Amino acid sequence: MGTEIDSKAKIISASIQLFSQKGYDATRVSEIAEAAGVAKALIYYYFRSKKEILDYLVQNLMNDAASITLDFINVQLNQMLTEKKIAIENGKLHFADEQAIQEFMTNINSYHQRIVDFVLTNRQVLRILLTEALKDSKHRQQLFQLTKLTPLVDKNLILKKALENFPQAENAALFKLFFFQIPLLGFAAFFDDYKSFSQQSEKELRASFLRALQVITISLITGSKVKPNEGEC
Amino acid sequence: MGTEIDSKAKIISASIQLFSQKGYDATRVSEIAEAAGVAKALIYYYFRSKKEILDYLVQNLMNDAASITLDFINVQLNQMLTEKKIAIENGKLHFADEQAIQEFMTNINSYHQRIVDFVLTNRQVLRILLTEALKDSKHRQQLFQLTKLTPLVDKNLILKKALENFPQAENAALFKLFFFQIPLLGFAAFFDDYKSFSQQSEKELRASFLRALQVITISLITGSKVKPNEGEC
Amino acid sequence: MGTEIDSKAKIISASIQLFSQKGYDATRVSEIAEAAGVAKALIYYYFRSKKEILDYLVQNLMNDAASITLDFINVQLNQMLTEKKIAIENGKLHFADEQAIQEFMTNINSYHQRIVDFVLTNRQVLRILLTEALKDSKHRQQLFQLTKLTPLVDKNLILKKALENFPQAENAALFKLFFFQIPLLGFAAFFDDYKSFSQQSEKELRASFLRALQVITISLITGSKVKPNEGEC
Amino acid sequence: MGTEIDSKAKIISASIQLFSQKGYDATRVSEIAEAAGVAKALIYYYFRSKKEILDYLVQNLMNDAASITLDFINVQLNQMLTEKKIAIENGKLHFADEQAIQEFMTNINSYHQRIVDFVLTNRQVLRILLTEALKDSKHRQQLFQLTKLTPLVDKNLILKKALENFPQAENAALFKLFFFQIPLLGFAAFFDDYKSFSQQSEKELRASFLRALQVITISLITGSKVKPNEGEC
DNA sequence: AATGAATGAGTTTTCATTCAT
DNA sequence: CATGAATGAAAACTCATTCAT
């Protein structure tokens, strides 16, 4: 013990690799053992069952997520409001000066960076969770619980403003889910595939995605009210 | 001869139900048989293997998708350009008058409606395909092939304009994928869950999502250029 | 009926082909149907079961065999004895003159020809029977029953003489079985393989085998007594 | 750890028993498990498939056969030639004296003994191989490869002489196959059946068969040339 | 005479899990 | 901690046979 680089860690690592690659159901315990370079029976020394490995991975992700304070942006936004660098008028943000805009952009970007870094770092387990969430209601709950950590609507002043464009309250949640959280998950889940397809570096892709987030955010903030079609849509 | 309303159809229907519910791997052939109300062996009379059922479902989806012309919007857009109802200046769309705006909105919404209707109608198989795409490269290819049917960037003048906001060409593809196609897929895949969670009707959700698509689209079209942060992001 | 070249015959023919090729157990009823170009269910119109097809083939073989009089040689041999063309002295055949030898050879050869022609004509079913006899005692009985049709020991004067070389009576049966009947069966069973391997024509092989039978027969008839090793063999 | 005297050996033994009894196709894996007194799944712990058990048995037979030097007789024959105890004149063997004949007989018998012992010891697997060879070309090849270990024609001076009786060279191979190798295989394959039928002891049958081999061999060696019938045979 | 559809009872194979050491 | 051996339960798939027409 000590020298043999922690069998448990190897089992966990192999599990992440395989679950995210082939899915939980299609992954065999024997494959995990083989990939981890340990005997199959050892897995049952550390985990009660195959299911428990999955639970362990997801729980770890949840804990990691919880330990990250993602709403720090609000603190800074409020500070900017207090310092009169920004103001909200007629449902739109107004900036005191060019420097205020710059500061605002920096803050919002740093906020997005944190989220993107988190999903990229944990992309394999996120992919596992996403896949499982598509078929298991328990994991679906966990996935949605996870998205609460991106408090765009409730706490984040920015999107809150932007989402006022939507007449119904629920629509805000819908927009948040399908155009912010789902893209984030999708980015994490398909990152490696898209990377090899686009032949861009990890860094470039990350930057591009962040810029896309900016486009959406800014556009929304400064965007005009939408008159929803009252047709038969 | 009348009672057994096409056993094959019942098998297919049961497969869609179960695959989309529990995932392909977790669905047992015996469960399909039970759900379809036929003998297990009959499934192998119509399909060579469990895998072939999946292939059949996906192939059918692909064929259905192919038969739908999703880029009709371009035709109408071009017509509006010809009729001088809209013009493109400085990378932004300019409208001749209020009526032009209205017509444009109608067109774009009808375009989105078609896509949304397609993904909602086929949401179960789409969910299956999405789940499988997350673990099987063959299905990943099919999923991406499917997204080619939403020709937002290449052929669609609207997003083309909007996406000029992105400095690099590749970013357009990234934006298209993660903020249009993935949300669409996500909407289809999580529709039923979100519906029961939000307690909104199918019609309402569809309308809300369409409005969200409008928000994004309009905001982008009329949006100001984004100066990407040049920091170490 | 009449035009459609007899479905039953096609089923039988396909069965012979497949049973002899892959063995009874490994042949599927569906394969027979396919090879015969009829629906699987039709097979059950003509035969109660797959087993019954096999029984039918073997029974047909037995009947064909029974209808051939294979011991006609004895008649002619006895005639030669009566006509003093041959005589038996000291356990060896003595011939009256060269012409007698010639006549004798002709007779014996014509006898062998009949047998060889029979096994070659029926080689496919014989192969089936041989294979089945190796695992099923009922067919083993039928195979041995079939060999009674080659009455070399009991009725055939020639080998009877030759086999007097063997001290024990049973040995005659052993010799007959392993050095006459088994070779005959082997010749029939492996004929097609040996033919394509040796690249000789069917006619040539048949002639060669007949010559080999002569060699054995003649050698035995004129052969010297064998003093069996009395060692521990 | 002592009680379970090697489960793998028990599986192999049960497989040999059952395959040779009922044939490979008709033997169920569950039967092997039951006969071996182990769980069905254990069979798949040691063998990838039912087919692999068969392959293992045949391969083992091939290896055993290869490890036995069956042509040692040639060494002794050559020695007798060198010692002038035998000579070859006019295509026939001539012996120096009575003692030479006796020595020769001893040698040839010891040669046959080895072969017969080998086929008797491995009669069950040989029977399996024979049965499979009748339907699978791969096993046919292996069967014929096995017969190469009885180098009667090419290396064995005795039969080489004898076979000169045959005009065509190929006939030698035919004779070797159908009147030496096939009888040997037949003896092995039908040994147990013939034994219980003849009610002779194993020892007696073995001795009888060896004597039959002697009869054939001696007769051939001292036999007169055969004038093949030039008729329409 | 002929067949497409259907199935019960098996068949091989798999796999998560346990046990003895 | 670690493992080779072992297994019960179930999985996918097969196949001879039957049924309705």
Image (tube, coloured by chain):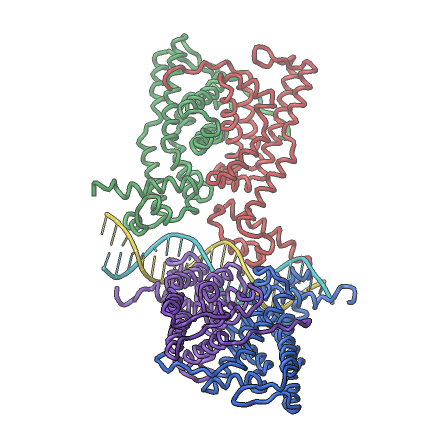
Chain colours: A green, B red, C blue, D purple, E cyan, F yellow
Q: Quadrant of residue C185?
A: bottom right
A130 left or right, relative to C128: left
Evaluate whether residue D33 shows in this view: no
B130 left or right, relative to D34: right
Q: Quadrant of residue A95?
A: top left
Quadrant of the image containing the N terminus of chain D: bottom left
Q: Position of residue D204 (x, y in %)?
A: 40, 82
Which residue is at the far top?
A: A97
Evaluate whether residue C89 shows in this view: yes
Q: Position of residue B157 (x, y in %)?
A: 60, 20
Q: Residue at x 67, y 80 (%)?
A: C67
Position of E3 relative to B92 (above/below): below
Q: Residue at x 52, y 76 (%)?
A: D223
Number of marks present in the image shown = 0
Q: Quadrant of residue B59?
A: top right
Q: Please state which of residues B33 and D210 is positioned toward the viewer in this rendering.
A: D210
Quadrant of the image containing the C terminus of chain D: bottom right
Q: Position of residue F2 (x, y in %)?
A: 26, 49
Q: Please state which of residues A4 and A11 is positioned toward the viewer in this rendering.
A: A4
Which residue is at the far right?
A: C3
Position of C221 relative to A129 (above/below): below
Q: Residue at x 21, y 40 (%)?
A: A3
Which residue is at the far bottom?
A: C82
Q: Please state which of residues D35 and A26 is positioned toward the viewer in this rendering.
A: D35
Q: Position of residue A215 (x, y in %)?
A: 47, 19
